[in-house]
Amino acid sequence: MNSPLPADRWQLIKRLLADALEQPADQRQAYVAQQAGDDAELLAELGTLLAAAEPSRSVLDAAPAELALDALDALDALDERLTQPWLGRRLGAFQLVSLIAQGGMGQVYLAERADGQYEQQVAIKLMRESLFDPSLAERFKAERQILASLDHPNLAKVFDGGITEEGVPYFVMERVVGAPIDAYAQRQGLDVRARLKLFRTVCAVVEYAHQKGVVHRDLKPANILVTDDGVVKLVDFGIAKRVNLPGDGEGGDAATATRLRVMTLAYASPEQVLGQPVTPVSDVYSLGVVLYRVLTDTSPYAGEATNSDFTLSQAICHEEPAPPSTAVRANRALRQRLKGDLDAVVLMALRKEPAHRYASAEQLSDDLFRHLEGLPVQARRGAWSYRAGRFMLRHRAAVGAALVANLALVAGLGLAVYEGIEAKRQKDRAEAHFASVRALANMLVFDVHQAIEHLPGSTSARKLIVKNALTYLERLGNEAKDDAQLKVELATGYRQIGDIQGGPMASNLGDPEGARNSYERGVALLEPLLASELPPKAAAAANLEMTRTLRVLALLQAFRGELDAGRQRAEQGIAVARRQLKTDPDNASAQRQLATLLGAAAQIDDFAGGERDAAFKAAIDESIVLLERLYANDPAEVSTGANLASMYGLRSQHLSRGPTPEKDALAMLADEERSIAVLLALLEKNPDNTILKANLAVVYDHRGYALQLLDRKQEAVASHRQAVGVLEPMVAKDPDNVMLRVDLGTFNGELSDALLLVGQWQAAVEAARTALDTFAKVPEDARNNLVSLRDYGMAHYYMANALKARAQAPRQSAASIKADKAEACSNLRKSSELFKAHEAKFGAGGASMPNVADELRGCS
């Protein structure tokens, strides 16, 4: 449906149609495409007329060219009488401009909006007056109602409808400018993969219609248009039918068949030809014919070339189509491409009995998807037995009674051999696919993810990569339940997605509950493996992954205030690592995991406060000894150095929370300097590693506090500024990274405190305000763990102190003093509220917090 039909255009169409109809039936579409060239509208018009000429052939087999041309000549005068009165007429907001096409019950006009609201071109379909009949009018209205009930991007939309003054029904719809799908594929030179993808879109829109209870009943290339930008549009629901509706059972369908028998024979299903009830599976058959043409540019029926409706009907109902690959013998490459899977898929769609076809357009599309993905197609299961049964049915008269038993035996043996060979082939293919998908998933989890893990701004990309890989692994896990290595790979995937969701030691998205669930799934996979007898290599892999998962799970639970549960998980991991080292004492990975698990246990003991000082010291000292030995052997190993730097920092922090931090300040500073030296050495070779940078920022902040204790105030401010300076650009590049954002809020608060010590009250206010703004952008769940909740409260406390200092500064107006005091009191109240919430949730513990009760008494 594209353009007007002036007299010279109409004569050109008649001439080209006459020439086309003189060509063999299987060459007509190619001839029309060649003659139309780049004129998409001409190609569409000729395609529609060719399709209309096919079902109009006489059952007496009169020459179709003569019949079609005689009909066109006879309609010339009638068209003049029928179309002229409509041209220029206004229907609703639209004015009819020209006739686009006609056929069946309707005429389609190009129309333009005429109410001045805005410019718009549409197509308006009117029922042909020459065919006006009450029952046909109901059919026309039914088409309008069907289209109005469907809403899909690949369907021509209906905008409006009504009845003219003369009582002629019409409807206004989207104007579609496109070429038939087979002509489009040929003109664009699409390869088989591109044609299948295009056809799957057709299947999707047909399936949508079926889900809405609508059977199209006239699926053919002329009704499946493709626009210049490759968008499929399914059009012409003129003979579509609703199914499974009250009063619209088989009787209704039969009535339609006896009165109208409207169909395009070359694309009709056997049940349509025989006048039997039509269902969605009938559309599947028509899709099979369309797919055959799209792939081969020819018809599946040899009888179509005879121009005989009777011969074609016999072929549709009784003759098995040749495989598509045999229809393109001259093209060796295409023949090989179609042979096998695609032959089976097309022939399954074209099975004579509806029960043996694909049950839906979606199933047909799914098999094409499986082929495109290299998976076994469903169509090849039982295809040989189906064809054998059809052969015997067609030739039953020639099969003598004396041969039946032997034939059955031979057929049975042949079928068994064939099915055995086919089963082995499918098994080999499935195993090869299993291996390739597994390799892809592991590449994503272990190679691609690790390659970008420490890059700035990679948090969201890491989540996408690991989640997709995990989807692959979960599917494989369902197929290989006894594969120990696959379970380890799955557990690794769960750990990594947990780290991204809300891991305590990695860039994360602020979802600690999701992280816990992922870690627990990994542990559940690994525990049965560790309890079983595994080969040494498999056991080592399972042990290593279990220690990694238990470490992050232990720390996550500790950060959520579950200190005892977290310590138990850490001890469980320590036991696994020690057991592995008994059998393999030189295993560096097991040594490193033991050291990091000891560090996790020490961190949890630090959270618990003074009651676990002895346990803390034992764990941290053993961890540092192990890591120093590993680092000395391989100073370039990033994870060893990063963990050693963290352990130095943790030992320093524990001293800062002890009973005499001023006395221990030099020891604290020494550990921080050791940590900085290790991190700077690693960063020199790994400048983009975000974990190393984040750890360096933490150490700079901690060193600032040690310098404050030593009364080296200016150096303390400089160190706190270094911490903020490292993190700010990292957060800007990776705004989804919750861990970095929490740290940035904390460090700005502590910078504010250091600035007050050197009398920079205005800068202190600004730093504290930045801290609060940063915390405000952190998800609530991530802001309420053991460390973050305390630091958030401290940010409000630092803000109150900075505001009070500014209020006491000289040359402040009375109004600004009053405002600063009021805001200071508000922040004190908020800090008190957060500290109480922290104590209620986590207990007194080791998180030291100021008592603001006395300061609040000064607030009105």
Image (spheres, rainbow, N blue to C red):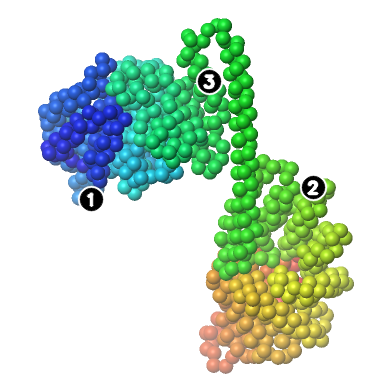
Residue extending furthest toward the top:
401
Tell me if mark 1 has few (under 14), some (14-19) or many (20+) residues whose alpha carbon lies within 10 angstroms of its own: few
Residue that appears at 63% across and 34% down? 424
Residue that label 3 marks: 388
Horizontal and vertical percent for residue 400? 53, 7
**Is 316 in front, or is 747?**
316
User: In this rendering, would 801 be left or right of 54?
Assistant: right
Residue that appears at 56% across and 60% down? 461
The alpha-carbon separation of the residues under discs 1 and 2 comes to 70 Å
Residue that label 1 marks: 119
Residue 642 appears in the figure? no
Residue that appears at 72% across and 90% down? 711
Horizontal and vertical percent for residue 587? 81, 63
Tell me if mark 2 has few (under 14), some (14-19) or many (20+) residues whose alpha carbon lies within 10 angstroms of its own: few
Q: Earlier in the sequence, mark 2 or mark 3?
A: 3
Q: Name the image quarter holding the N terminus.
A: top left
Q: Earlier in the sequence, mark 1 or mark 2?
A: 1
Residue that label 2 marks: 528
Q: Earlier in the sequence, mark 1 or mark 3?
A: 1
Horizontal and vertical percent for residue 456? 57, 69
